[in-house]
């Protein structure tokens, strides 16, 4: 299984873009392409839906050594035994989440400002998501925070920082030039004509950690 510290490309199977029926094959395409981490995000779906889908996706990710992360449902992460859980600012705290999933499951936290990134570090998050850098249909209610604070967050973070929000192949150079080391890519992959090729091309453009 790939270590979290060795991961620089984070993919998401988001049911806002992909149907439940198509989600396992999308997970396979993302993994085949070369994502280092894979999250299952299923807003507005029941925990039973998430649990059933996680059971289908977990064998795909595990065979490739790619950690599977569940968004928002720590009880599902605990039940299926996946490698990670991701929580937002309005979800349970890192400590409360860890009490549900146990010590073997890492906990990531969404942050939208330098202050929130610092707070997530204090909470003990195992990684932080930082963004959205650009406007994105994935999270239309969040105003983009831009690129200016990436270097500051990277300067104090002692855990991986994954920059998220509108990242694609075209924007990747400016995101990296702003200090990012790791990125999350969602719609650019999920809407690609050839998902495997899109992932492969982007991962090849990332620098060595």
Image: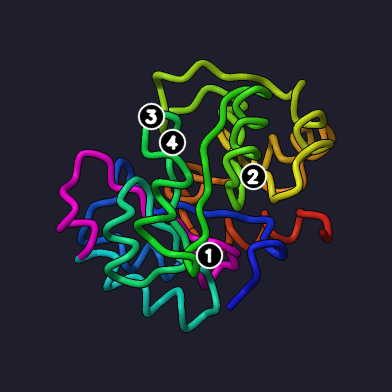
Asked if residue 47 lies left or right of residue 79, the reply is: left
Magenta stretch containing residue 60, yes or no?
no
Cβ–Cβ below 8 Å for labels 2 and 4?
A: no
Q: What x and y, as percent, mark residue 122? A: 64, 38
Residue at 34 percent of width and 57 percent of height: 100
> Between marks 2 and 1, how big is the CA–CA gap?
21 Å
Q: Secondary structure at mark 3?
A: loop
Furthest residue in direction bottom, as rendered: 63
- The one of 68 and 170 positioned closer to us in this rendering: 68
Residue at 46 percent of width and 79 percent of height: 62
Cβ–Cβ below 8 Å for labels 4 and 3?
A: yes
Give neighbour class at mark 4: few <14, some 14-19, many 20+ (Cα, 10 Å). some
Q: Nearer the viewer, mark 2 or mark 3?
A: 3
> Between marks 1 and 3, how big is the CA–CA gap?
33 Å
Cβ–Cβ below 8 Å for labels 4 and 1?
A: no
Q: Determine whether 9 is above or below 128 in the image.
A: below
Q: Tag on residue 90? A: 3
Residue at 30 percent of width and 41 percent of height: 16
Q: Nearer the viewer, mark 2 or mark 4?
A: 4
N-term mark: 1 or 3: 3
Q: Nearer the viewer, mark 4 or mark 1?
A: 4
Magenta stretch containing residue 43, yes or no?
yes
Q: Nearer the viewer, mark 1 or mark 3?
A: 3
N-term mark: 4 or 1: 4
What residue is disc 4 on? 88
Asked if residue 55 lies left or right of residue 128, the reply is: left
What residue is disc 2 on? 162
Part of the protein shown in magenta: 30-51
Q: Secondary structure at mark 2?
A: strand
Furthest residue in direction top, as rendered: 143
N-term mark: 2 or 4: 4
């Amino acid at each position: 299984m790939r270590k979290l510290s060795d991961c620089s490309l984070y993919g998401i199977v988001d049911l806002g873009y992909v149907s439940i029926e198509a989600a396992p094959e999308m997970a396979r395409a993302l993994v085949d392409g070369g994502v280092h981490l894979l999250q299952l995000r299923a807003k507005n779906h029941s925990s039973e839906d998430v649990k059933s889908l996680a059971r289908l996706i977990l064998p795909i990710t595990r065979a490739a050594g790619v950690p599977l992360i569940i968004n928002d449902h720590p009880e599902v992460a605990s039940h299926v035994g996946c490698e990670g859980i991701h929580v937002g600012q309005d979800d349970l705290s890192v400590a409360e989440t860890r009490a549900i999933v146990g010590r073997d499951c890492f906990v990531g936290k969404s942050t939208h400002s330098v202050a929130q990134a610092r707070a997530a570090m204090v909470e003990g998050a195992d990684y932080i998501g930082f963004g959205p850098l650009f406007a994105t249909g994935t999270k239309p209610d969040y105003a983009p925070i831009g690129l200016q604070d990436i270097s500051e967050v990277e300067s104090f973070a002692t855990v991986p920082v994954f920059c998220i929000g509108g990242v694609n192949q075209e924007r990747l150079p400016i995101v990296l030039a702003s200090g990012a080391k790791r990125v999350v890519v969602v719609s650019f992959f999920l809407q690609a004509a050839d998902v495997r090729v899109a992932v492969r091309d982007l991962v090849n453009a990332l620098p060595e950690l």
